[in-house]
Amino acid sequence: MGLPRQVAALSTGMLFGAKVGFMVATAATISGCMLTFLASRYLFARWVYQRFPSKSLVIHRFLSVNTFTKALIIRVLPLGSNFITNIVAGATKLPFTPYIAGSALGFIPQMVIFSLAGAGIKLAAETQQQMSVALAGLALGLMLMLYIKHKHKLQAKKKLSQG
């Protein structure tokens, strides 16, 4: 809990090799994600909501729809702290299974890269760049899909209110 996933993957890659290091680090990262999420849900949710009611509501409304896809996007683009993301997600009462599943799938690309690096397997700079572009493309595609889905939903509501 709280350890950056990149450090876990690099360390376990060094200790156990790329394959076992990847599996151990990924299992540890998913376990840490689940434990932080659940601890936040059962220990801090009331405090967070009382302290930040409007922000909690905004975050919950955003992440509670298409939770799996949004969690996946958040994890593929490693921006910010996983620990804080898990605390906020747990405190805002997001659905557990889609959040954890999207997170777990989103963890995989970086876990592979850092486990390989820890094992001493050097990826060519070109390969790393290609993987970065592919991951950014994946995240962009998922965000576009969510935008289109949201736009269609708004148009359907507008037609219902007019008809």
Image: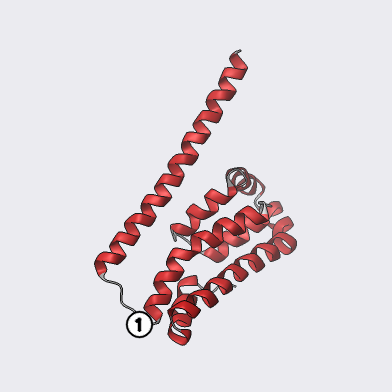
Residue 57 locus on image (x, y percent): 64, 45
Going 51% across and 29% down the picture, which residue do you hit?
152
Q: Which residue is mark 1?
A: 120
Going 71% across and 57% down the picture, which residue do you hit?
45
Going 54% across and 54% down the picture, which residue do you hit?
71
Left/right placement of residue 85 relative to residue 80 reads right
The quarter of the rendered structure image containing the N terminus is bottom right
Crowding around mark 1 (Cα neighbors within 10 Å: few <14, some 14 to 19, many 20+) is some
Give the colouring mode of the picture: secondary structure
Q: Is residue 8 above or below residue 70?
A: below
Left/right placement of residue 23 relative to residue 135 reads right
Left/right placement of residue 145 relative to residue 1 reads left
Number of numbered callouts drawn: 1
Viewer-proximal residue among 11 and 88: 11
Going 43% across and 79% down the picture, which residue do you hit?
18
Q: Quadrant of residue 112?
A: bottom left
Q: What amino acid is found at the position of numbered circle 1 in the picture? A: Gly
Residue 98 locus on image (x, y percent): 62, 53
Q: Is residue 65 above or below residue 25?
A: above
Q: SS for tag 1?
A: loop
The quarter of the rendered structure image containing the C terminus is top right
Residue 19 locus on image (x, y percent): 46, 77
